[in-house]
Amino acid sequence: MSATATAPAAGAGRRTIAVMVLIPTVVALALWAFAWPAARTAPRDLPIGVAGPATVATAVERGLARHEGAFEVHRYEDGAAARAAIENRDVYGAVVVTPGGTELLTASAASPVVAGLLREAVTAQAPEGTTIQVTDVVAAPSGDPRGAVLAASLLPLALAGAAAGAVTTLLGLRGTRAVAALTGAAALAGLVGAALADTWLGALGGNWWAEAGLLALTVLAIGSTLAGLAALIGKPGLGLGAFLIILLGNPFSAIASAPELLPTAVGTLGQLLPPGAAGSALRSVSSFDGAAAGGPILVLALWTVAGLTAILLGTRMRRVEPATPLVPAPAPAPVG
């Protein structure tokens, strides 16, 4: 068999081996990214408030300290200050001790999982026969009391952004055309997302236009990231972007629980990626009148600016690439 015949066969063999190795690797990474944080869910420095007379509040704080490393306790003068802290998203809940008894303030809108965890922790350390009054200061929207719809909405948003970036790249749109296509697609996706999640499902309860704008910014941040990476390093940039956004960003977002319930490094990284920032900002805009939304929105804005800049820069780099000089073919040797 000639060398020219064996070359395609060798190439096909290498591609076969590459597929055999790549798929199990992707499966392993996906299981690690999605299953490992879920298996390690536990409170880690979860912000919680304590209010009441100093001696009693100190006793409550000591009881919470038995859960080593679980809670970060903040002291407040009274129940009103503790409520304000919850509404500002400084803490997830608070234990308020008064002469009339002990009251637990929660915010299921911040995280139904955390609200349940606080009920269990505070009830478990209460003296036998003591009744703990539980008040949901900021309740989750009536259309989504368990936060399931909000959690399920994040992956479609990430996929929409990834699809926008991939389609823009594969259609060959560059420069300002790519920016316009991504911006328009994100704006329409934000309107559709708000219409479905807020108007139809009732899973969001804040200002409709603010929610639509945030959803649009999320799609734009993700789409521009993928398209920007592709503009700089070619189509492999789409794979890198999908790895960051889908494989890491989505499971690390903690939208179904809270960043403080994931391993510390994972929770921190998740809030620096678009899906995690979008989830936190959406909770703030939907239920807390925008409290504590500034940081997550800034993260989304930075990803957006970086992605759009990369698109324009990549287009400019292609325009200034020097043309390959044409080398004349050597003249054929004389015969004879």
Image (spheres, rainbow, N blue to C red):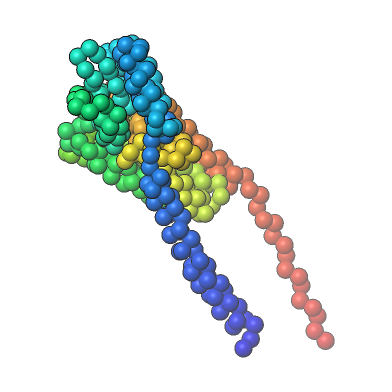
Looking at the image, can residue 175 be seen? no
* Quadrant where the N terminus is found in the figure: bottom right
Point 44% across, 40% down: residue: 263
Q: Residue furthest front?
A: 128
- Location of residue 298 by image quarter: top left
For residue 23, above or below residue 292: below
For residue 274, above or below residue 25: above
Q: Position of residue 72 (x, y in %)?
A: 41, 26
Q: Position of residue 61 (x, y in %)?
A: 37, 22
Is 171 displayed left or right of 16 in the figure? left
Q: Residue furthest right?
A: 336
Q: Residue furthest bottom?
A: 1
Count of all numbered marks drawn on residues in the image? 0
Q: Position of residue 297 (x, y in %)?
A: 40, 29
Q: Nearer the viewer, residue 62 or 133?
A: 62
Looking at the image, can residue 309 be seen? yes
- Location of residue 149 by image quarter: top left
Q: Position of residue 57 (x, y in %)?
A: 34, 17
Q: Nearer the viewer, residue 261 or 89?
A: 261
For residue 6, above or below residue 318: below
For residue 125, above or below residue 167: above
Point 22% across, 38% down: residue: 146
Point 30% across, 29% down: residue: 125
Q: Nearer the viewer, residue 265 or 180?
A: 265
Q: Nearer the viewer, residue 192 or 330?
A: 192
* Quadrant where the C terminus is found in the figure: bottom right
